[in-house]
């Protein structure tokens, strides 16, 4: 949790508040397999299944655990409308719309994750790598309820940067906002210039 000392400080303070309200805190519980460097160790396939599910719903190998996020299947989401907005049916339609509509501010925000989805789809759709990725993510996701049972806990509380695969495992998530960064906090920006940390950034 050294990634951001400001967030870490407020995260730990929130744990104290929970404890003062009667919660029993079991600190530093550990997964049998998962750890913070896990995604880097499996970076070639870790996000592949997520990208495939975002891009196309009718993949033959999406059979293990249903994705619970309604936006994690854009094709099915668009088809749920009686009249899809602007005639959009699949992710590339949304990308085209975002680029063409000035109000979407594509030049400022971009959509790098969507571009990764398209590249992954073109390269890996229908390959064994997709099944390997899904099996890996499913195995890790199923450790969440097992971890809670083992530690006799009801919820898993983590800082915002911690990937737990909870959404893929069908585990509900809640994000709790923290105070904005203070006036003297160094500015950190994305390559596009968008500030992600700095004075006044929540």
Image (spheres, rainbow, N blue to C red):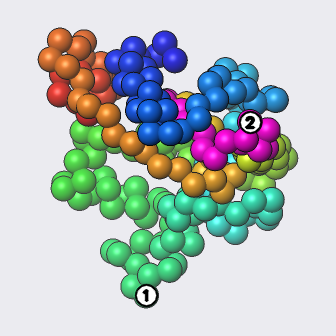
Q: Residue at x 65, y 23 (%)?
A: 28
Mark 2 or 1 closer to N-term? 1
Residue 3, placed above or below residue 127: above
| Label tally | 2
Task: Indicate the position of residue 108 as horizontal and vertical percent values.
Answer: 24, 39
Q: Which residue is mark 2?
A: 151
**Secondary structure of the residue carrying numbered label 1:** loop
Q: Which residue is mark 1?
A: 82
Q: Residue at x 47, y 59 (%)?
A: 92
Q: Residue at x 43, y 87 (%)?
A: 82
Real-space CA distance between mark 2 and mark 1, rounded to the nearest whole angstrom: 46 Å
| Callout 2 touching callout 1 (CB < 8 Å) | no
Predominant secondary structure in magenta?
Answer: loop
Task: Indicate the position of residue 36 as horizontal and vertical percent values.
Answer: 64, 23
- Write the start and end of the magenta stretch as one range: 146-161
Res 136 → quadrant: top right
In the foreground, 121 or 149? 149
């Amino acid at each position: 949790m050294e990634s951001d000392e400001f967030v870490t400080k407020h995260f730990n303070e929130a744990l104290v508040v929970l404890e003062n309200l009667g919660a029993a805190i079991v600190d530093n519980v550990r997964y049998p397999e998962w750890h913070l460097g896990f995604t880097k160790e499996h970076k070639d396939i870790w996000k592949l299944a997520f990208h495939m599910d975002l891009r196309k719903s009718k993949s033959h190998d999406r059979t293990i655990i249903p994705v619970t996020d309604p936006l994690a299947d854009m094709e099915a989401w668009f088809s749920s409308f009686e009249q899809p907005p602007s005639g959009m049916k699949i992710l590339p339609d949304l990308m085209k719309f975002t680029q063409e509509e000035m109000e979407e501010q594509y030049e400022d925000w971009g959509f790098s994750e969507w571009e990764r989805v398209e590249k992954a789809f073109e390269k890996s759709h229908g390959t064994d790598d997709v099944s390997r990725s899904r099996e890996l993510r499913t195995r890790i996701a199923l450790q969440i309820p097992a971890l809670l049972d083992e530690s006799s806990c009801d919820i898993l509380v983590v800082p915002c940067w911690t990937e737990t695969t909870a959404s893929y495992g069908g585990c509900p998530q809640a994000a709790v906002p923290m105070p904005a960064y203070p006036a003297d906090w160094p500015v950190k920006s994305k390559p596009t210039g968008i500030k992600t940390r700095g004075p006044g950034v929540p």
